[in-house]
Image: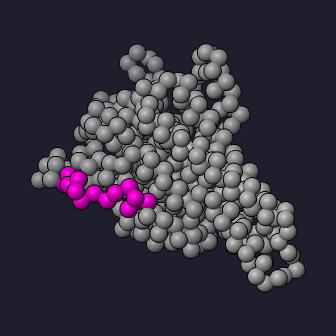
Amino acid sequence: MTAKAAVLQKGIDSKSLPTSAEMIERARDLSKLLAAQAGEAEKLRRPTDEVIQALKDAEIFKLMAPKKYGGFEMDLDTFFEVGLALSEGDASMAWVANFYIEHVWIFCLFPEQFQDELFADNSYALAPAMLSPTGQVTNEEGGFRLNGRWSWSTGIMHADWVLPAAIVTGEDGKRAPVFFALPRSEVEVEDVWFVDGMQGTGSNDVLIKDKFIPEHRMLSFKAMIEGEAPGAKVHPSPVYKTPMLPTLGLAAAMPALGQARACVRMFQERLHDRMEIHGTRRVGTASKMRLAHAEVRVDQIYLLLRNLVEDVMELRENATRLDRTRWATQLAFAVDQCKSVIAYVCEAAGASGHFQSSPLGRAARDINTVGAHIVFDLDARLELHGAAMLGEEIPGILV
């Protein structure tokens, strides 16, 4: 049977699809496992095998894969709620899970020939997408030859494929960033992930040495950013016409909000415990006010991101540059606020939160690292959006 025939045979019956509510409930159940294994993932410096298998068993990675290939073809609103539920369990492993889902979506934007090959045996493939275009590309007949090192390879430790970015020079002499796709078996991994936060992601370096990439395994950044990738013409669902950056930014922002929610809940539980045991530290008015203040702030952040999701879904590929700079700014602002809430709660929770095994301390370490991601540079985002509001030309590709 050809790859094309296998794909067509695998198409999923819409009646057998889980609902959005069912997928969100699966994620909520899984978040308990993520929380229980967070300490082990931190020690291993990668997600635990048990968590990755549980995510596979719950079909989480099929979330945004097309029905044509046996996926569920769900939209950003479900992705947001599923990723947020996972993120309440652990930031690191949810970060990996969210990006695995989002990178399946990226695979669906490639030319159909590659998609038929990729999805012939499974409805998804797990892959890191290394956004910084640090490799060297040589144009060859029928494709490209790739060499180099890529850092920040989230998901590499359980990957099937990899998506390195690089700069390609076109026939007109213009240089443009693209994603390439190649099997995990064709790359080397160097263990460099010794960090103070997000230790459980295992985002090690990837080395690629003299590998040929056929032309149909290349995807233009510009096409993704504009919602005009080849896959958007193959699959009718609007989700494949969504601009890349708000989708990527959402995947990265959910662990921050999920952990802010979890910290408020843990703080509330600590205060209950103090009230019950009548210990040396009473629960005073200030602690109650701080708890209520933190809850309100987390609710505000949720509503901001939920509104952003609805806005992106409404505008899609018709979004203007101003729309995209606004979304990018809102995402960076939301993560900055999550950092602030977590610090605010940890400050009041007591010295025990500084033990390495403490979920509160882990949340603070993790979210400080999340906030260092290039897409969450709030000063840069505010500058670009302010310039866009004044009608100025906006440089760069990260909007």
Residue drawn where x is 24% and y is 39% of the image: 113
Q: Residue 189: in sight, yes or no?
A: no
Q: How is the image coloured?
A: one colour
Where residue 80 appears, x then y in whole percent? Answer: 48, 50
Quarter of the image for residue 192 reads bottom right
Q: Is residue 318 visible?
A: yes
Quarter of the picture holding the C terminus: top right
Kindly identify the residue that appears in the image at 79 percent across and 73 percent down: 352
Q: Residue at x 68, y 30 (%)?
A: 382
Query: Can you give x and y, in whole percent of width and height, for residue 321 in the image?
Result: 53, 24
Instruction: Provide residue 37's location: percent of width, then percent of height.
Output: 56, 72
Is 120 a magenta residue?
no
- Prevailing secondary structure of the magenta residues: helix
Within the magenta stretch, is there residue 15?
A: yes
Residues shaded magenta: 10-24
Instruction: Please determine whether, in this image, residue 192 is positioned above or below residue 318.
Output: below
